[in-house]
Amino acid sequence: MANVDGRDLGVARVYARAMLDLAAAQDQADALLEELQQLGQAIAGNPELATFLASPLVSGEARAEVLEKVFRRRASDLLVDALEVINRKGRLGLLPAIIEAYRGEYRALRGLVDALVTTAVPLTPAQRTRLTQAIAALTGKQPELIERVDRAILGGLVVEVAGEKIDTSLATQLHDVGAALAQRAALELHRGARLVEGGEPVR
């Protein structure tokens, strides 16, 4: 949703919440999430489809006809009906933002949260488990780790949850993991320096 302005983002969230409320009432929240993600992938991979959905040169009636032909009986009635409502409001161009907003609302409903974890060296399975438990204790939510390796970071570990950085000096639950990662990174750098000095290739 990086290219969506604040007003449109607010509109996307309104539609997403309404869709989630309907889906949850029908016990279809999980199924609708999967359908929306597939639709998002289709839009991202098909510029012509994205243009058709968003273009002001295409009438709402023409889009409604295509929605019926393409999606009815191939997707859930819940999804198709929602698409038709969004089309009548002239908001189909916001579908990528609506889909992402639905994912966020769904995860909040389920008590899930994305955690971007940047480490100097890759996490071991044990560290991954400890980190997941520590973030869960800090946030009260079940984190899904999105891992990234950046050997230039200091301290061995940076964690961002919902776009906010967790200061590992304050989050004592993360301190041990961060210290272990920093030590591993230092050892790897030291080992690499020794190999270079000895004339052997660094792996």
Image (tube, grey):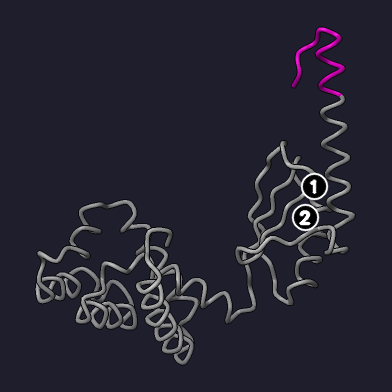
Residue 41 x, y percent position in the rendering: 37, 57
Q: Which residue occupies 49% across, 71% down?
A: 103
Residue 124 numbered tag: 1
Per the rendered image, the range of residues in magenta is 191-203
Residue 144 x, y percent position in the rendering: 65, 63
Residue 100 x, y percent position in the rendering: 44, 67
Quadrant position of residue 1: bottom left
- Label 2 packing within 10 angstroms: few (<14), some (14-19), many (20+): some
Q: Considering only vertical position in the picture, is 21 above or below 59? A: below
134 on left or right of 142: right
Q: Label 2 belongs to which residue? A: 128
Residue 47 x, y percent position in the rendering: 25, 52
52 on left or right of 187: left
Q: Considering only vertical position in the picture, is 61 above or below 44? A: below
Q: Which residue occupies 35% across, 64% down?
A: 39
Q: Considering only vertical position in the picture, is 50 above or below 118? A: below
Query: Disc 1 marks which amino acid?
Result: Thr
Query: Disc 2 marks which amino acid?
Result: Arg
Q: Secondary structure at mark 1?
A: loop
Query: Is 105 contained in the magenta span?
Result: no
Which residue is at the front of the view, 114 or 8? 8
Say whether marks 2 and 1 touch (CB < 8 Å).
Answer: yes
